[in-house]
Amino acid sequence: MPYNFICYSWCKNNFILSSLRSTFSFIYLNVSLIVISGSSIQA
């Protein structure tokens, strides 16, 4: 029983971490695109 609970909590945490990582990478890509377009407009 504890083994199943550990596996379940690890899988849930892993899923949350992967979704957070993808969300942060998506935000980072958008910010870099905005910064690149802003610098090209200024230049």
Image (spheres, helix red, strand yellow):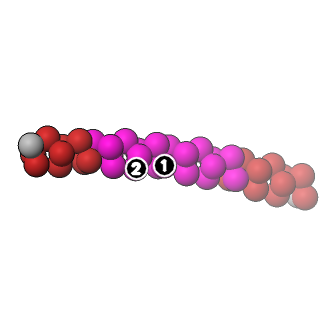
Q: Position of residue 29 (x, y in %)?
A: 63, 47
Q: Label 2 belongs to which residue?
A: 17
- In the picture, the quarter occupied by the N terminus is top left
Q: Is label 2 in a helix, a strand or a loop?
A: helix
Crowding around mark 2 (Cα neighbors within 10 Å: few <14, some 14 to 19, many 20+) is: few
SS label for mark 1: helix
Q: Residue at x 18, y 45 (%)?
A: 5
Residue closer to the observer: 10 or 37: 10
> Which residue is found at the position 48% from the left and 49% from the top?
20
Please name whichever residue, 10 or 17, is drawn nearer the observer in this view of the structure.
10
Identified at 17% across, 49% down, the residue is: 6
Q: Where is residue 13 in the image (x, y as percent from the top left)?
A: 33, 49
Which three-letter amino acid code belongs to the residue tagged 2? Leu
Query: As rendered, which of 2 and 42 lies closer to the eye?
Result: 2
The spot of residue 11 in percent (x, y) is 27, 42
What is the x, y in percent for residue 9? 26, 47
Residue 20 got which mark? 1
Query: Which contiguous range is marked in magenta?
Result: 11-31
Q: Are marks 1 and 2 in contact (CB under 8 Å)?
A: yes
